[in-house]
Amino acid sequence: MRRRQFLRTGLLAGAAVPAAGLLGEVTSAEAALASRQLFPDPRRGLRGASSLALDLLARSEGLPIAASPAPTPPRRLPLADTFPDLPRHFVFEYYPWYGVAPWRHWTQWDRLPPDDVASNHYPRLGPYDSLSTAVLEQHARWIADSGVGAINLSWWGPGSYEDRATPRVMDVMGAHGIKVAFHLEPYADDRGRRFRDDCLYLVREYGHRRRFDAFLLLANADGKSGPVFKGFRCLLPREVTDCHGLRQPVPDFTADSTWREQIEGLRATLRTDFDHTTILADAPDFNRLPASGFDGCGVYDNFVMPVHYRPMAEAASRADLLFSFNVNPGFDSITPRRLERGACYTPPPFEPPVSPPFDWAMESERERAAAVAEERIRESLRQTLAVQTDPALGNLRRGFFLVYITSFNEWHEGHGFEPMQDAAQLTPDQRALGYHNPARGDYRLSLLAELLRPVLEPPAIEPGPRPFPLV
C-alpha cells in the first residue's frame, strides 16, 4: 500500500499491544494482506508498512483483546482551564509533498492529473502545489477556523522536498497562529542511527534560527514546555514473512538499544534549552517503548478502532508511558491499477467496515459513506478525550494532553479533513473516474469544528454547523 500496511480483522484491528497481553490472534489470512510495499522507498515517497502492521506480520499468535467501552466525557471539559494553549494540543497530520511542475504524489499508482488524481476524493482546490503560497494560505485559514492550533509536518530528512518546503509552510502557518511540529518519516534505512542529529537539525533550523516563531513547544499542565517529535516505523521486527512464505530482513530495523542511545543523547543536548522533550513512536508495544527510551505511543493507523483506545491507554499507564490516539474519519484508500506478477497485495477494506459494501456510483451510497465517516470522527474524538481526561490514567496524572487528527491532507488514504469538491461541482470527466465525493465536500472539517468548539471554549448556546467557503 501507499503508506500504511492496512491489516485489520475483527478484534485484531483494534490494537496490537503485546506488552499488555492485548495482541489479537494473527492468522495466515492477515499475513496475506501484506502489500508489495512492505518497506520504504523514500525516492518515491513510499513509507511501507507501519510498526504496528509489521509487528502483526511478524507474530503468529497472541491473546484476544478485552475491550472496555470508554465512559462518556463530561459535556464541558475543563481542558481550557488546564491548558491555556489548548488549540495547540490538537494537531493535524500535514503533508507538504504535493507538486505540479512536475507532478508529485498526485500521479501515484498510474494516475494522470489534473482530472485523474491519486485519491478517491477530488480536492476542492484540485491537484495543488504544496509550495503555493495561495494554497498554504487557504489551508491555514481552514485549519484556524476549525479550532486546531498546530500541524505535524511529514518530514523526510535534511534536503528533502518536504524539508525545502518547511520554511514556507512555517511562514504561512505562523502568520495564522498555527504552530508546527514534526513527524519523522522512514527517509533512510539508517534513520534510527542518526535520529538525534536530525531532531537537533529541526530544532536549530526551524526553532532557534526563527526564534521559535512557528515551532511547536507543547506546554504541560504545569506550564513546562518543550518540543514533541513523532516517528513512523520506529519499533520494527528484524524480519517478516511475505505472502510467498519467504523470510525477509527489515532493512530499516533499528535495535532498541540504538534508539535509547539516540533519544538519551537528544534529551541531554536539549536539557538546557527546554523543560522536557517528548518523543513518541507509532507502535503501542509497551515492552519495547520504555526499553527504547520513547515517552510513549502516538498511534497513526486508522484500523485501530476507537473502542480499543481505553485498553491501550490502560496498558500505557501501567507502563508509565504517555499515549495519544487519533481523531479520524476512517480509511478509504486508492489501490494500484497495475500489479507486478506475484505481487503480495490485497486491496485494503474501507474502514470502519460496512455491510453491504458501498456502490460508489450511487449518490445515496456516497452519502452513506459520509455518514459512516462522521460517526467515526465523533467516536474517535469521544474516546480519545475520555481516556486523556480520566484521572485514573497516566496522561492526566502527568499533565499531558495531545490529540493528533489523521489527517489534514493525506489524499491517497482517504482520511483527509481538507475540503473535497462538492459532488455537484465535479466535471463529467471527473465523475467518470468514480470519485467518492459526497454532496457537501467540507463535511468533515465542518463537523470537527462543531465538535471542538465546546471543548476549546464552552459556549453559552450551542451553535450549529458552519460551512468552510473558499474565501
Image: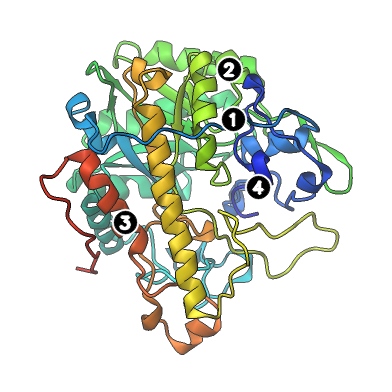
Position in image of residue 257 (x %, y %): 63, 14
Judge the density around disc 3: few (<14), some (14-19), many (≥20) Cα neighbours within 10 Å. Answer: some
Q: CA distance from mark 2 to mark 1?
A: 10 Å
Q: CA distance from mark 3 to mark 1?
A: 33 Å
Task: Pick the quarter of the image with the N terminus.
Answer: bottom right
Q: Secondary structure at mark 2?
A: helix
**Mark 4, residue position:** 5
Residues at badges 4 and 3 in contact (C-beta under 8 Å)? no
Q: Label for residue 234?
A: 1
Disc 4 residue type? Gln
Q: Earlier in the sequence, mark 2 or mark 4?
A: 4
Q: Which is nearer the eye, 302 or 344?
A: 302
Q: CA distance from mark 4 to mark 3?
A: 28 Å
Q: Secondary structure at mark 1?
A: loop
Q: What residue sits 57% from the left and 28% below the top? A: 284
Residues at badges 3 and 1 in contact (C-beta under 8 Å)? no
Q: Earlier in the sequence, mark 3 or mark 1?
A: 1
Q: Which is nearer the eye, 5 or 165?
A: 5
Q: Quadrant of residue 398?
A: top left
